[in-house]
């Protein structure tokens, strides 16, 4: 599939590039080892939240709201799922990475066709806002050797555990964690764990 830059005008429907000098944050992220395979995610990492960039994220970007700063890191080339929150998310990588994105408005009857997904490359050290209405999930690496380390800023407690009901209906079927509504591809590990199957079509693999 075509991979566009986040500086391409097409990205404006999904998010925007932010002005943030992330030197201290990048140094802290690089101290966290990559897993041998797969991906890892922690919603809140004290070593990252101690960086001065956290003050800007909490006080300026989120307007003083309680904020968490964590990271998604590892190796990935597949779509697998798409999620959305009620708030924007900020992403920043130590290396170039790729986001696979769609729009919440493109969900029809609880299902999204993966043919609507678009790919955007984010350069190392560039912070981007992913809008609340933008469907997204784990980043994809550009280099297998480098993998990816992507900081993830969100309102506090997003993506933390929440009790799920087996008889949920409507949008509640998608609620997978706090402030996290998830559509899984049938071939994904999340679907095998009971996540709502809301993606149809190819499970995109950038390889």
Image (cartoon, rainbow, N blue to C red):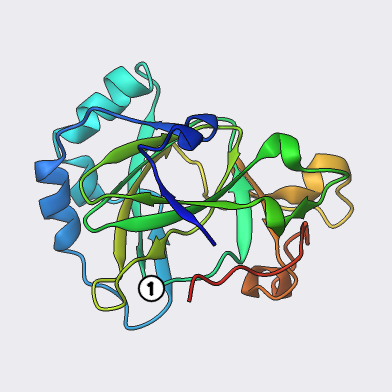
The number of discs equals 1
Q: Horizontal and vertical percent for residue 145?
A: 25, 78
Q: Horizontal and vertical percent for residue 174?
A: 74, 49
Horizontal arrangement in the rendering, residue 78 relative to residue 125 (left or right): right
Q: Quadrant of the N terminus?
A: bottom right
Q: Nearer the viewer, residue 113 or 83?
A: 113
Residue 14 vs 206, above or below: the answer is above
Q: Nearer the viewer, residue 41 or 119?
A: 119
Residue at (10% x, 43% y) in the render: 23
Residue at (65% x, 73% y) in the render: 188
Q: Secondary structure at mark 1?
A: loop
Horizontal arrangement in the rendering, residue 170 relative to residue 16 (left or right): right
| Residue that badge 1 annotates | 75
Q: Horizontal and vertical percent for residue 93?
A: 27, 52
Residue 37 vs 142, above or below: the answer is below
Residue at (16% x, 50% y) in the render: 26
Disc 1 crowd, CA 10 A, few/some/many (<14, 14-19, 20+): many
Residue at (62% x, 52% y) in the render: 117
């Amino acid at each position: 599939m075509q991979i566009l830059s986040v500086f391409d005008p097409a990205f404006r429907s999904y998010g925007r590039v932010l002005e943030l000098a992330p030197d201290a944050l990048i140094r802290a992220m690089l101290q966290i080892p990559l897993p041998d395979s797969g991906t890892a995610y922690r919603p809140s990492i004290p070593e990252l939240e101690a960086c001065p960039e956290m003050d800007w994220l909490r006080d300026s970007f989120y307007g003083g709201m309680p904020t968490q700063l964590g990271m998604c890191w590892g190796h990935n080339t597949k779509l697998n799922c798409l999620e959305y929150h009620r708030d924007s998310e900020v992403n920043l990588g130590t290396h170039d990475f790729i986001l696979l994105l769609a729009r919440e408005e493109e969900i029809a009857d609880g299902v999204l066709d993966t043919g609507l997904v678009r790919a955007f490359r984010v350069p190392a050290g560039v912070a981007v806002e992913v809008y609340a209405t933008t469907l997204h999930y784990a980043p994809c690496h550009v280099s297998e050797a480098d993998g990816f380390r992507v900081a993830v800023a969100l309102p506090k407690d997003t993506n933390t555990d929440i009790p799920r009901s087996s008889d949920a209906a409507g949008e509640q079927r998608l609620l997978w964690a706090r402030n996290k509504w998830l559509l899984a591809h049938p071939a994904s590990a999340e679907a095998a764990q009971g996540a709502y199957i809301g993606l149809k079509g190819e499970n995109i693999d950038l390889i």
